[in-house]
Image (cartoon, helix red, strand yellow):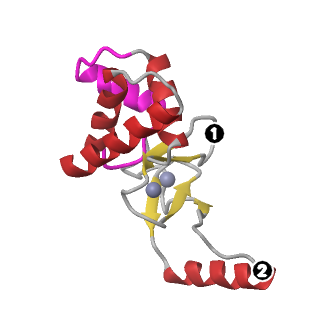
Amino acid sequence: MASTQDIETLKIQFADFLKRKKYRSTQERYNVLDRIGEIDRHFSADELYLYMNGKSDRISRATIYSTLDLLTQCGILMKHRFQGDSAHFELAIRMPDHDHLICVECGRIVEFREEGIDSVRNVVCNRLGFRPVTHSLQIFAVCHDPLTCEHNTQD
Ligand SMILES: [Zn+2]
Ligand SMILES: [Zn+2]
């Protein structure tokens, strides 16, 4: 979970961004950021919508979608497309430079860091004359036993 201090810093960054781009700065948008700080994992727009309405925040799906889009544009959120149609989001400060392993059967997402991947990135950049900045690797795989996987949420 992000600390309150982290979230306050991100709110200042977000406020600057909204002002610079001349977007309206509404309390609802900051509430979305607060709630995201409470979630320590990837989430889709729909999951955030259900979470916030479960907390009786009474926020519309449209506001959630547009706020997630703005938070991604200003670099506070990372947006991933693991598989299927719905994008997943996470705070960029959560875990820098990690990669994802996704089970194609049950949708379970595992985060990992593996230094070997950093060196592959550097070797490829060197060879092609680029300077590495960051990377995002997704490995699609299958759980040992998708039928008994505790993360399997499909019926
Ligand atoms: Zn699985
Ligand atoms: Zn992640």
Segment tinted magenta in the rendering: 39-59
Q: Is residue 113 visible to the viewer in this orientation of the structure?
A: yes
The circle on residue 84 is: 1
Task: Give the percent coordinates (x, y) of residue 90.
Answer: 43, 47
What residue is shown at x 60% (from left), y 64% (from top)?
A: 137
The circle on residue 129 is: 2
Task: Give the percent coordinates (x, y) of residue 70.
Answer: 51, 34
* Sequence-first tag of 2 and 1: 1
Name the one closer to the observer, 83 or 90.
90
Within-10-Å neighbours for mark 2: few <14, some 14–19, many 20+? few
The quadrant where residue 7 appears = top left
Q: Is residue 121 magenta?
A: no
Residue found at the far right of this picture: 128
Task: Give the percent coordinates (x, y) of residue 31.
Answer: 29, 28
- Residue 134 lies, with reference to residue 77, above or below; the image says below
Amino acid beneath label 2: Gly
Name the one closer to the observer, 99 or 133.
133
- Residue 90 lies, with reference to residue 144, above or below; the image says above
Q: Is residue 137 left or right of residue 91?
A: right
Q: Is residue 50 magenta?
A: yes
Within-10-Å neighbours for mark 1: few <14, some 14–19, many 20+? few
Q: Is residue 3 visible to the viewer in this orientation of the structure?
A: no
What residue is shown at x 36% (from left), y 16% (from top)?
A: 59
Name the one closer to the observer, 155 or 104.
104
Total marks in image: 2
What residue is shown at x 36% (from left), y 57% (from top)?
A: 94
